[in-house]
Amino acid sequence: MLDPRVQAAYARLSPEQRVRLSLALADRHASSGAMIPRLDRTGSHQLFPVSAGQHRLWFLDQLRPGSTAYVVPAAIELCGRLDQAALTDSLNRLVARHESLRTTFPSTGGRPSARIGVPEPVALVVRDLRGEPVERIEATVEEARLAEASQPFDLAHGPLLRSTLLRVTETRHILLLTTHHIAVDGWSLAILLDELATLYAQATAGTPATLPDLAVQYVDFAAWQQAWLRGPVAQEKFGYWRQALRAVPSLDLSPDHGASGTDVALPVGWPGELIQGLHEVAKPLRATLFMTLLAALAAVLSRWSGQRDIVIGTPVAGRPLPQLEPVVGFFANTLALRLSLDGELSFRDLLGRARQACVDGFACQEVPYQNVVEMLPPQRRSAPLVRVMLALGNDLATEAALGADMTLKVLPPAPTAPKFDLTWEVAPDGTGGLTGRVEYDPALFSQATVQRLHQSFSDALGQAVTGPDRPLDLPPVTHVLPSFPAPRVAPSGEAVPRDAIERLLATVWAEVLDVERVGVHDDFFVMGGHSLLATAAVAQVQEALGMPVPLEGALGATTIREFGVYLRELGEQAGLDVAGLAERAASGTNVHVPGAAAPRALDRELFRAAG
């Protein structure tokens, strides 16, 4: 237990000072080696825990099998005389070095686990495009990129890395590396490309392949994260998010009626002169450029929505310790930053609020986004917490030498299905300005609307430079409470379970949801359920009946009545008397059906901590 004097001193620190203290302590732990322990890897076919982010992506994959929403495609242009054998050898060494690239995710009792495979040769598919008409080459390359990004992954069996080499000319090749987000994030791609360049250069020079040893791998982080989420520090950070997002409304930007375009991104940018002006405005408040962009975007969204309470998301690296910096895996997290625009505000006033929201939020960034969402009341979860994202990237190099006579260039990402309504993604352009794009959902917004939104953003930034102390032009405060879909209510006389199957389901749901009573028409998710609890409920039903219950179909049955119908259909297909199994479950005399999961107790707290 901490000395009371230490606790009192810590309480007096500002949030920003706490951030600096946490980073200093992490650095001290790094130097002493007292950080994430390495798990024992002895034994074949060993299963390891998954991280909260991996659990969420696994669940989404179960919910929508064959989805490519989280496929991560990368295209690298290689210019020069390519040594294909050296390239293949370098890819093999990357897979051997990083366990995440050879990890699969089997399901055990309705829960995902991580299984690390042995290093195997990478299947580099080679396509020769030299016979293509010159005028068709670039179109063929784009078609190949889109086709590759459109192929789903099998998370349970893998592999989760695909590689294709397009031979355009004797001195120009396009390498397509495709992975799943459950195995990598943006930071990880930068690691892989940097190490690929190093290994290829060593292979072509005939020198031994040498890279610094990795102290830990991703499964070590996943196990550490599960323990951390159950600890006192995490609970304090949970408390921050619970308070910061109390009664948070949903952002309503009034989408275009009939929007149905095909474009999903709009190129954008701001000149260096404007960015330098923003730095000057931010300097007296000790604010950053990101905080300044955040304040301006909040003002724009407030004007467009007519709301004074705005939530904007931003991605963070999610690597809390230096030990994790060279590790490949899915660490990235999303922060939901909430800004109040109540009162008579100047831009400088709003920037101060944005700064505080960032300092507080980044101090608690280790809490997984899914856990934050699950803290919200059930009614609020019917609409996304974050609809708009703002990402300010680093000035990362997109070109590198690849051996003595080769260069590597990362090509702009191919368009993918947007994960949020709107996402501003910008980075330094090398001349002092910012460049990037706005991704948008074409089912919600036309390109013309997005162009007007971005112009409003640019105008707000310009006004911040020319008049930071002038009152903001904000909508009047209406104090209108957000509306949410009404919970499904059981019709009179039909709430009581009618047979043994529905009685079993009612018992399981009441336990999993921690409620006294569940009607057969009550919606699981409206009552407070979420992805992890749904998985837990299916696992308990499977255990009680002693028969396999596929998660995919079960998740589509959100009421007890619907779930009961689904179970009866499964029984008819398998020749099983599900009603009899449910009755025997109630009496404690059930038998195990081949193919069902082994019986296991439900650890509800573990499910919460794993998400």
Image (cartoon, rainbow, N blue to C red):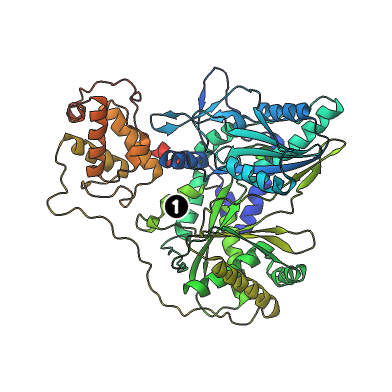
* Horizontal side of residue 27 vs 503, given as left or right: right
Q: Quadrant of residue 271?
A: bottom right
* Horizontal side of residue 451 vs 78, given as left or right: left
Depth check, front residue: 213 or 227: 213
Q: Residue at x 47, y 60 (%)?
A: 443
Residue 13 percent coordinates (x, y): 61, 58
Q: Residue at x 85, y 25 (%)?
A: 206
Q: Quadrant of residue 451?
A: bottom right
Outermost residue to the left: 493
Total residue callouts: 1
Question: Does any portion of residue 321 appear in the rendered image?
Answer: no
Outermost residue to the bottom: 470
Q: In the rendered image, which residue does mark 1 sit on?
A: 373
Depth check, front residue: 293 or 5: 293
Q: Is residue 431 above or below residue 29?
A: below
Residue 533 percent coordinates (x, y): 36, 41
Residue 305 percent coordinates (x, y): 48, 72
Q: Secondary structure at mark 1?
A: helix
* Horizontal side of residue 280 vs 604, given as left or right: right
What is the three-letter code of the residue carrying label 1? Val
Q: Is residue 190 above or below residue 567?
A: below
Q: Is residue 139 above or below residue 435?
A: above
Question: Does any portion of residue 568 appear in the rendered image?
Answer: yes
Mark 1 is surrounded, within 10 Å at the Cα level, by few (under 14), some (14 to 19) or many (20 or more) other residues, namely many
Residue 94 percent coordinates (x, y): 69, 30
